[in-house]
Image: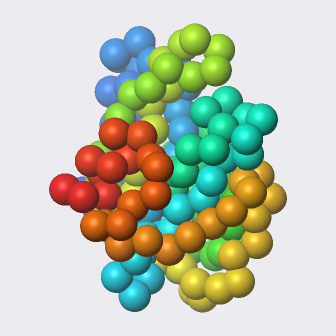
Amino acid sequence: MTITSPEFVAGLAADAEAAGITGFVAAAVINHDGRTLFVRRNPDDYMGGLWEIPSGTVEAGESILDAVYRETAEETGLTISEITGYIGHFDYQNSRGTTTRQFNFSATVEKAEPVILTEHDAHQWAAADELPEVTDSVRKLITT
């Protein structure tokens, strides 16, 4: 079963639901020339100023993979050319005080520039040994 098969993706959602998690976020770890793309949350947002990988809420009726493609395009202006792997997930408390599961996929993009931000105030490409201020979950995801 491939990571892009509907059965694999449905299994991810089913596992999360079985754990009582109803909030899903899809994220793309985009690498280019040995660096990963990070975007910084606006200062007035929840967890403002923190750097993260492009990610966003899986909408009702949308698959986790569809959300990876859509959120990457919406937040960065970049078009994913291929999902290359499933890196894993982590859970966190969201701004409403409930638990969200973030599903993380490695992806390649058609072109790495220009990055056009719509929801963040900065972006950078960083090597694993020079990460900006990220959560421990994101750090572990990128460095393991």
Q: Residue furthest left?
A: 144
Q: Position of residue 54 (x, y in %)?
A: 57, 56
In this view, the residue in front, 5 or 32, is 32
Q: Position of residue 104 (x, y in %)?
A: 40, 50
Q: How is the image coloured?
A: rainbow
Q: Position of residue 128 (x, y in %)?
A: 31, 67
Question: Would you place residue 136 above or below residue 131 in this image?
Answer: above
Q: Position of residue 86 (x, y in %)?
A: 32, 56
**Splitting the image into 4 quarters, where does residue 62 fall?**
top right
139 lies left or right of 62: left
Residue drawn at x 33%, y 49% is: 139
In this view, the residue in front, 108 or 46, is 46
Query: Is residue 117 visible to the viewer in this orientation of the structure?
Result: yes
**Splitting the image into 4 quarters, where does residue 96 fall?**
top right
Residue drawn at x 38%, y 47% is: 138
Question: Would you place residue 121 above or below residue 59 in this image?
Answer: below
93 lies left or right of 14: right
